[in-house]
Every structure is written in structure tokens, then in C-alpha cells.
Image (spheres, rainbow, N blue to C red):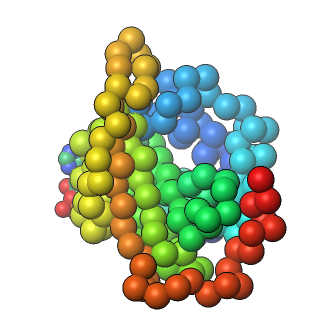
Amino acid sequence: MSLTLRDATLADLPVITEIYRESVLNGVATYEINPPSEKEMRSRFETIIGNGYPYMVAVDGDRTIIGYAYASGFRTRAAYRFLVEDSIYLAPEARGKGAGKALLVELVRRCTELGFRQMVAVIGGAHPASIAVHRSVGFEHQGTMKATGFKHGRWLDTAIMQLALGEGQSSDPPEDVYPDTLYGV
Ligand SMILES: CC(C)(COP(=O)(O)OP(=O)(O)OC[C@H]1O[C@@H](n2cnc3c(N)ncnc32)[C@H](O)[C@@H]1OP(=O)(O)O)[C@@H](O)C(=O)NCCC(=O)NCCS
């Protein structure tokens, strides 16, 4: 597979919506149960981009979008502003060929460059592939919240993994990155 990573655009939303729809319907990575419409995915995309987080697609050689990844705020309270959460979704036929790791490595690089200090993965169903891809990029398992989801007729554990970015906690963050006013709630 020849792989290119690039910023996602509005034109990518139909494929992104379809990739996410498959994971909502068949997987446990996301705890959504009803697939969001393309309009809703577009609104989420615009919020993420508007808040300055990276949102990327992985493109196969023949220009087919095979997956996407983005960072977003973990929670909205202002003190969380140096922490991002990652999300990665691949089309089923693209899994297990290195695209997930490539997207995550690039997401980590960009979030580090933007000045974020920690990245967290909230892993639905404590799914082995998702745990493996995060571990392979250096994330550490911080714990598991037992029976915190219920989907496909069963209780799901949620694993939390974390990676320090850049200087991590070894220095205070610069004050000019993501001022409190952006969060304001
Ligand atoms: C989870 C997901 C993003 C992983 O991406 P991927 O392209 O399939 O994984 P990669 O091929 O890049 O593999 C990365 C590492 O994980 C390992 N891995 C991948 N799938 C695995 C599996 N099912 N079981 C165990 N290890 C696995 C690989 O061996 C590789 O390890 P290495 O770097 O030590 O060689 C992808 O499978 C996916 O989109 N799944 C459905 C949605 C999902 O679970 N998203 C995660 C949300 S947090």
C-alpha cells in the first residue's frame, strides 16, 4: 500500500462519514450507536478545525481515502487545554497494514508542534488493535474503566492510554497557546 497523509477537507466528508458509519454500526471503538449524518460530521469537523486541532486523512495510491484521524479537546474545562484526545478510524480492508500507526505518529508530531503536552486515547471495548497501535507509538496504559459502555448487547471496558508530548510535565506550558477564553465554560 502506498500511503499519503494530508489535511482533511470538506470534500472528504462523504468518505469520512461512511468510514465512521461502519465503525459505529459494527465496532466498539466508538460508543455512538446511531451513525451521524454527513451534515453532523461536517459540523464536528468544522468545530475541530476551528479550534486549531489537526484533522487528517490517509490516502491510498489510487487516491482512495482509507482512513482518518484527528485530535480534539479531552474535556472543555480550561485546565485541560494542554491535553488532547486522539481518534483514528480506518476502512475495514485497510486495517493491519500500517496506516493506523502512520496516522497516529503524524498526529503526535503535529500536536507536539502545536504545543500540547499530553495525548490520551480512550479505547472503547479495550480493543486489542487499538491498544496495540497506541502501544507501538509509545502510549502507556493508565487504567481501565470497567463496564463503562453497553453496545451490541454486552458491557464494554474502556482502556485509557497516555503519551507525553514534547516537554510534557517537565516545564510549564507557554501561556499563549489556547487561552482560557476558547473554552470559557
Ligand atoms: C485501531 C486501528 C486504528 C489500528 O490501525 P491499523 O492500521 O489497523 O494498525 P497498524 O497496521 O498500523 O498496526 C500498528 C501496530 O498494532 C499492531 N496491531 C494491529 N492490529 C492488531 C490486532 N488486531 N491485534 C494485535 N496487534 C495489532 C500491529 O502489529 C502494529 O504493531 P507494531 O508497530 O509493533 O508492528 C484500526 O484497526 C481501526 O481503524 N480499527 C477500527 C476503529 C478503531 O478501533 N479505532 C481506534 C479508536 S481509539
59 relative to 156, above or below: below
Residue occupying the point 34% across, 37% down: 145
44 relative to 48, above or below: above
- Quadrant assignment, res 158: top left
Report if residue 141 is visible in the image: yes
Name the residue nearer the viewer: 160 or 18.
160
Relative side of 176 to 23, left or right? right
Residue 180 x/y as whole percent: 75, 69
Residue 38 x/y as whole percent: 73, 37
87 relative to 123, above or below: below
Residue occupying the point 73% across, 64% down: 51
- Residue positioned most to the top: 153
Name the residue nearer the viewer: 141 or 13.
141
Residue 17 x/y as whole percent: 63, 40
Name the residue nearer the viewer: 64 or 17.
17
How many badges with numbers are in the image?
Answer: 0
Residue occupying the point 72% across, 32% down: 37
Residue 121 x/y as whole percent: 41, 53
- Quadrant assignment, res 147: top left
**Quadrant of image for the N terminus:** bottom left
Report if residue 66 is visible in the image: no
Residue occupying the point 67% across, 84% down: 175
